[in-house]
Amino acid sequence: MLNLKKRKIATLIAVILGSSMLTACGGDDGKNGTNGSNGVIGLDGSNGNDGVNGTNGTNGTDGANGSDGANGQNLTAAAKLTRLATVPVGAEITGMFLTDNDELFFNVQHPSDLSGNETPAKVGVVTGFDWSTLDPMTESLSVPTTDTEKMAVRVVAGTYQVLGQAGDTLNNQLPHGLGAIASADQATKIKQSQDPDFNAFVPTSASGDTGFLFTAWEDRPGAMSRIELSKEDSGTWTIGDAINVDFSAVLGTLINCFGTLSPWNTPLTSEENYEAENTEQWNNTAYLDGYPSYPDVKNLQTYLASSTLPNPYDYGYIVEITDPTSTSPTPIKHFTLGRVAHENSVVMPDWKTVYTTDDGSNKAFYKFVATNAGDLSAGTLYAAKLTQDATSAPAKAGFDIQWIELGSSNNTEIKTWINSYNGITEADYIEGETSYITQTEIDDWATNGTGDDRYAFLETLRAAKAKGATTEFRKMEGVVINYDGVASGAVPYMYVAMSEVGKGMVDNEGDIQLDSSAYCGAVYRFGVQTDFNVNRMEPVVVGGAYNSDGDANGNRCDVNGISNPDNLAVMDDGRVLIGEDTSKHVNNALWIYNPKGE
């Protein structure tokens, strides 16, 4: 501002001086001087007032209607429960596995035909159909009525392709046959299993058209086959290499039941050791009715080619198959998840939290939290404590869940505890006593903290009961999630099958006191919280009461409802596949439950 004033004063003085000189000299005007610089720009004036809005123009004519869009899937209008498949008389449906391409594998376990001649078990896949496109309005497949229908695998869509039958050598790659239980060195065939259970397809290509199918064989000893598969343009599958997984490094397995594929693509097979809480009978030569029985234990000894009775604490765990696509997959027993009759375990999207079920009567429900994500070799084991709603009706009664900590350890430490019971034989058996862990030891640990945590991992059910957990479940079977749905929150649920609502669940004692109106089984749902904990279970599908007389065709559970649900699978849209393991339907069925159905 000061410089501007100086420039104005200088200009004024120059004008005055110039005028005086012209007057004094009286001569002609001089030449024009150069133009001065522009002055500063003045401030903007204030805005004028807004103009008045003009009147609205007349409406144009309506355009033509667009064409109708395609109908969406109306899940709310569908039936709640629809029958999708039936299998031959005597068979159950096992190994349900949905691939990333929505292809469905399942097995036909232990079938027999109407004439009494046994037919082999089957491992197979439904071809020619994408199960994600299944119309919720699809009508139930009919109940088989003719002998032909009763002995067939029938599906509501696509075609069931048999990949292999029990005993098939698969181009001489399995000398003893598919499902054969052979010694660890493969020199001796111990028995032929008819019990394929868990399937897991591990893809080896981005398209998912090639991969390895792992199938667990639920026998004593247990086994697992691996078949290389490739899908043709026609949609059918072709078999390549075939091997049996070598379990000798983990001293064999017992009763490989259902399972899941871990988030890091390793199969998790389950040792369903029904006698895990009856360890005192392991070396009893007269124990013939157990599962496993003493003869089964001797078969295990044959498998190992051992002169010594196997150690009972080596059996009853979740077994992870690492390096699944290598020439020689490597099994690892995770003692950390407890020793029980594992039906299966399911790993949550945090890669740390695992839920596992215990099959049989008066059993418990467990949660494991790994120390490190993606590594099940160390962590903490918990058992559930239930509080029932104020009703005894199985279709209405839900349960609140609390978790009781049992113990923390790792595979290495637990294996050391296991080995301390090596070398015990039949000669050590004394009726009425035990050669192994005693109930007094377990009670002292639970009440007074005496000893280490071996009891939580070697005698898991007895330890859970001593700690106050609920031990009344009857036939608690498959526990599953839709991994992507839980991870994203789109399907934030976990489901479990209760094959039978009976025995400890209906005896008017303890934490679970239901009536007997759902003897044919139920499916329960858990809401998964953001930390992957569950604290509530509620019934969503409930079978009816048992009819001892049966209907005109011999069905002792209503054919329009579930009977003894076992394996489950959750689809991307939240619908749930339910496979039966029942003698109360003449033909076992595969169902789909629509949670949005009427």
Image: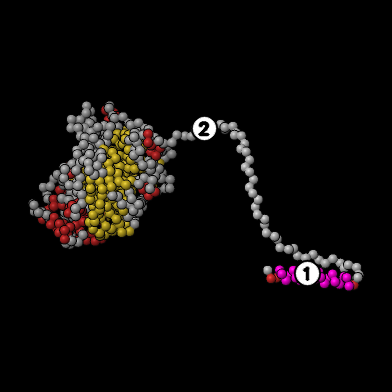
**Tag on residue 581?**
none
Q: Where on the picture, by quarter, is residue 583?
A: top left
* Between discs 1 and 2, the one toward the N terminus: 1
Main secondary-structure element of the magenta-colored stretch: helix
Disc 1: which residue: 12
Q: Residue at x 79, y 64 (%)?
A: 35
Q: Residue at x 15, y 59 (%)?
A: 444
- Check if residue 23 falls in the magenta segment: yes
Q: Is 314 above or below relative to 59?
A: below
Residues drawn in magenta: 4-24
**In the rendering, at what x and y percent does residue 484 appear?**
38, 47
Which is closer to the viewer, label 1 or label 2?
1
Q: Residue at x 26, y 57 (%)?
A: 380
Q: Amino acid at mark 1?
A: Leu
**In the rendering, at what x and y percent does residue 316 appear?**
22, 51
Q: Where on the picture, by quarter, is residue 580?
A: top left
Q: Is residue 273 visible?
A: no
- Check if residue 75 falls in the magenta segment: no
For mark 1, does the 10 Å Cα neighbourhood hold few (<14), some (14 to 19), or many (20 or more) residues?
few
**In the rendering, at what x and y percent does residue 460 appear?**
20, 53
Front residue (pair 476, 46): 46
Q: Residue at x 35, y 38 (%)?
A: 596
**Tag on residue 67?**
2
Q: Quadrant of the N terminus?
A: bottom right
Q: Quadrant of the C terminus?
A: top left
